[in-house]
Image (cartoon, grey):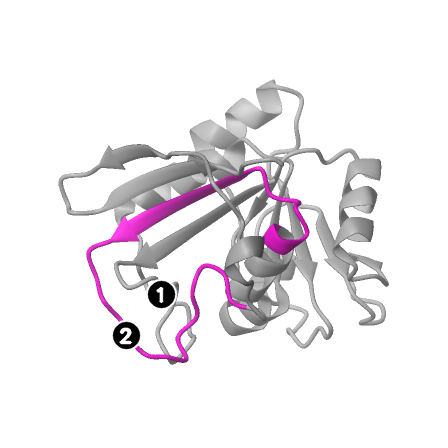
Amino acid sequence: MLINVAMTLDGKIDTIERRGAAISSERDRERVDHLRASVDAVMVGGRTLHAEDPRLNVRSAELRAGRVARGEPEQPAKVAITSRFALPQASRFLTAGPARVIIFGDVGPVVGAEVYGTSDLRDVMDKLRELGMRRILVEGGGTLNFALLQAGLVDEVQLYLSPLIFGGSSAPTLADGAGLTRDLAVQLQPPEIDAWPNGGIVLRYMVKRS
């Protein structure tokens, strides 16, 4: 499982408004498009789902064609873990792209989606593996990221560090949730670093396994 985020210099993945503020550059959006094209599913948590109604699609026609040529669906599956589902039937999450839509949580039936009534993360991963999905890209938010890291389910973290500062003690970060004490901190391998001319930096970390 791979977590990917775009983050400001002060560690924020959105502003205090929590409306999906633009952080990535166009080059970084292309990088994320390649990531999406390489996975079986793209996952988000409930807050990201409802605040942003994300498409989670591969944008590039060339990358989509490459997936089809490899015998894969044109788009990766969209996965949400949420305690409620309040998006309209015409939402982008449900309708954008010819993608399989999977929702985990006790939310009742949703037209156009497969719904599984569990939000336990290990059960979620077991079900996704059962459905043939091995490589999962997680695109937020901070609460889901933290829960996955705490559960030891994450293999890799990639982040685009943008030359911006948002501030705000209530603005979300890469990993929110309850937090960990120092002795329980998730440890990462030394990163691969790619500095870009626009001032942004891409960092790629592998998670240490005990």
Secondary structure under tag 2 reads loop
- Report the magenta stretch's main SS: loop
Which residue: 43% across, 70% down?
172
Q: What residue is pinned by disc 1?
A: 12
Picture coordinates of residue 67, whole percent (x, y): 57, 26
Q: Does the magenta stretch include residue 91?
A: no
Could you tell me residue 191's position as x and y percent?
Answer: 37, 35
Residue 201 visible, this orientation:
yes
Residue at 55 percent across and 66 percent down: it is: 179
Quarter-of-image position of residue 131: top right
Count of numbered badges drawn on the protein:
2
Q: Residue furthest front?
A: 183
At mark 1, the secondary structure is loop
Q: Nearer the viewer, residue 174 or 67?
A: 174
- Which quarter of the figure has residue 20? bottom left
Q: In which quarter of the image is the C terminus?
A: top right
Residue 102: % across, % down: 74, 53
What amino acid type should be assigned to the residue bearing mark 2? Gly
Residue under numbered circle 2: 167
Say above or below: 200 vs 178.
above
Magenta stretch encompasses residue 160? yes
Q: The N terminus appears in which quarter of the rendering?
A: top right
Q: Which mark is residue 209?
A: none
Q: Looking at the rendering, which quadrant does residue 144 occupy?
A: bottom right
Left or right position of 202 against 64: left
Please give the range of residues in magenta.
149-176
Residue 87 in the image, given as x and y percentages of width and height: 64, 73
Q: Are marks 2 and 1 in contact (CB under 8 Å)?
A: yes
Between discs 2 and 1, the one toward the N terminus: 1
Instruction: Tell me: residue 176, above or below residue 33.
Output: below
The CA span between labels 2 and 1 is: 7 Å
